[in-house]
Amino acid sequence: VAAGLRRALERRGFDVATATGIVDGFAMLRNVLPSVLMANIGRNQIAGTDLCAILRGTPGFRTLPIFLYGPNGIELEE
């Protein structure tokens, strides 16, 4: 799923950064303020609700659109 999403977004002119896991992802967020965050919750590194709660409690990320995807498709956290 991630590779397909990446290709589709890049073809449409978006810049895409990919993290290899939750630790890498949080490290990247210290240096980049994304327009949207997409997270694979099927990898069981962190629950999607926990990820959203952490980001919503972090200044600068309270209104960040978050798309969670996994084996059951894509969900939008509002």
Image (cartoon, grey):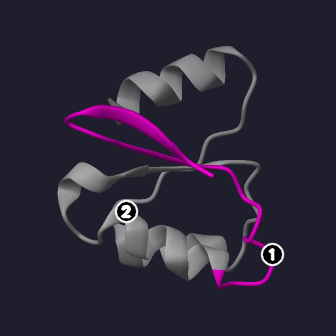
Q: Position of residue 60 (x, y in %)?
A: 80, 75
**Mark 1 burial class by Cα count in 10 Å: few <14, some 14-19, many 20+:** few
Q: Is residue 74 magenta?
A: yes
Q: Would residue 1 appear left or right of 63 to someone viewing this image? A: left
At x 77%, y 62%, the residue is 63
User: Could you tell me the amino acid type at mark 1?
Assistant: Gly
Q: Earlier in the sequence, mark 2 or mark 1?
A: 2
Q: Which residues are magenta?
A: 57-78
Q: Is residue 70 magenta?
A: yes
Q: Position of residue 78 (x, y in %)?
A: 63, 52
The vertical placement of 20 against 71, above or below, is below
Mark 1 secondary-structure assignment: loop
At x 73%, y 30%, the residue is 14
- The answer, for residue 25, to whether it is visible in the render is no
Q: Residue furthest front?
A: 78
> Which quadrant of the rendered structure holds the N terminus?
top left
Q: Would residue 77 appear left or right of 35 to someone viewing this image? A: left
- The answer, for residue 72, to whether it is visible in the render is yes
Mark 2 secondary-structure assignment: helix
The vertical placement of 59 against 32, above or below, is below
The nearer-to-camera label among 2 and 1 is 2
Q: Position of residue 23 (x, y in %)?
A: 39, 78
Spatial distance from mark 2 to mark 1, Cα to Cα?
Answer: 19 Å
Circle 1 sits on which residue?
60
At x 20%, y 36%, the residue is 71
User: Could you tell me the amino acid type at mark 2?
Assistant: Gly
Circle 2 sits on which residue?
48
Task: State the residue in front, 29 or 69.
Answer: 69
The vertical placement of 60 against 57, above or below, is above
**Mark 2 burial class by Cα count in 10 Å: few <14, some 14-19, many 20+:** many
